[in-house]
Amino acid sequence: KGRPLRRHRRMWPLLFVLVATARGASEADAICGGFRIHVVQLPKPSFSVIPNATSVDWDIWDPHYQGPGTVEVFRMPPRPPIRFRTRHQPPDLSVPADGPVPGLAGVPCSYIRAGDVWHLPCMYLTNLGMGSVQQQTLTPLDFYDTYSFSLDWFVLRYIYNNCHEEDPEKATLFFLPLPLTMLYKGFAFHMFTAEEVLGYLSQVKAHLEALETWKRKGGRDHLIVVSKTIYDFQDVRKGAAYTGFRNSDPFWSLTNVFSIEGPFHQRLINMPYPTFLHPRSDSDVDNWLAQIQAAKRSRKAILAAGSRASRRHLIKECSADNGACDYFSASGDVADTAFTYWNLIDLYMKYTFTLQPAGDTPTRRGFFDSLLAGSIPIIFDSIDEPRRKNKLSGRLGDRRYIYSYARFFGETSDENRRWIEKIAIVVEYEEDAFRAIKEITDEQIAQLQKNIVEIIPSLLYWDTRWRSDSRARSRKYGAQNPIARALRELRDRPYNGTPTGTALDQL
């Protein structure tokens, strides 16, 4: 009678291996959408303004660099050989920029411009692309000043840490780390010439055309991240002119695209803007969720926005004592004011609602900041006629929240527009917003807040040094992160090569 038991005992190691293998495959499906992703090694730019690469301390593109292991304190880099007094002043190449700094595609951060403060790119690249840590008293968690248009960095580091396949013959998806935002900013502020930028993109295309992995499917199993709105890369827009990358270019016509804003399209998955919190463990997420749920909030809305003609009436009403909203001016350069990113989140956490009128584009990072702060965003649009012209919702109707993020939030078509009402209040005009704030019931507020808490883990880009193999620390929320969610959507509804957009989309 003992022999069968001994036979079973001999099989236990095999059963353990089978169970562990199945669990590993399941986790790979959850974290990477089942893809084994090869990062295509693109040529690095070679621009005349860039000094010797030895001035780069570490590079976002480096698959082996994993950061210092602790919070990296931002160090002011040397001033680059261009004085940012005006946009049109050419580089002074006689002034060297010495000292190692973070880099992107071999370009030192001090040679990229992202705003009116010359050292901002270095701040944003600090901590492996998460940005410099803010000195704040809001939470014991690290709070990062993350660049709004850093999605490509987060995707690249996520792939290297969790989904990377070194052998291209074994890969099932190929990631192209095109540094489009860097090219855009470098050309816009006269760091790189048009000939250099367009020449670089031609070099990238020639490199891809020579690869067997590209020839097999013409790029259909390749992925590009456009960290700015996809609208910027239409033929007539600056993004296309400044980088040479165009939505309508037949070369890229089969390639999958992740972006932060765009129309509902089979080629395109629009993802949340990267924001301020990048957890390392489930406990980080739980601590944040507990904090926002415990926050004491005014039953009014806060409008924290710069002054624009389209917002004039909204600002006027919120500036008056109408009992529905307060106004805080967010105008001005961060270098000239004590108001910081974490002050904005602190402000959001003191209010039940936030008003989110359109800015340069229909969507705002503030919408996602509001959700992460546990505050209910109020957006301006029409559920019944979402493409109707409205100055507060932005003129690009098919790029508003309802269409832009429908696919990310699980909609299989753009016909169901009411998904947005689970996490936000949708109104058309200023008066509608004030009325909604006054008429909404406590029960409706509680339901919206509950929905927001449930969706927050899907908005959090994890620490760029996080690895999913630390399962015990991230089993609860790790697979809910936006990149994992987008990869699963790409797996479940791949692009079949049939154009589905309009001439305006150019996709």
Image (spheres, helix red, strand yellow):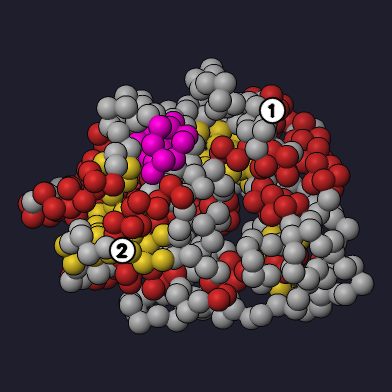
In what element is the residue under mark 2? helix
Residue 333 in sight from this viewpoint: yes
Identify the magenta region: 389-406
| 21 lies above or below 70 | above
Can you identify the residue that label 2 sits on?
Answer: 319
| 377 lies above or below 336 | above
Q: Of the numbered discs in the image, which one, if any, rests on residue 382? A: none
| Image quadrant occupied by the C terminus | top right
- Between 37 and 366, which is closer to the camera in this rendering? 366
Please state the horizontal and vertical placement of residue 247, each as a whole percent of the image: 63, 31
386 on left or right of 249: left
Q: Nearer the viewer, mark 1 or mark 2?
A: 2
Q: Most extreme residue toward the top, as rendered?
A: 498
326 on left or right of 168: left
In what element is the residue under mark 1? loop
User: How dense is the environment of label 1, judged by Cα within 10 Å: few (below 14), some, or many (20 and up)?
Assistant: few
Residue 281 in sight from this viewpoint: no
Q: Amino acid at mark 1?
A: Asp
Residue shown at the point (48%, 41%) measured from the top left: 261
User: How dense is the environment of label 2, judged by Cα within 10 Å: few (below 14), some, or many (20 and up)?
Assistant: some
328 on left or right of 495: left
Q: Most extreme residue toward the right, as rendered?
A: 94
User: Picture quarter containing residue 40?
Assistant: top right
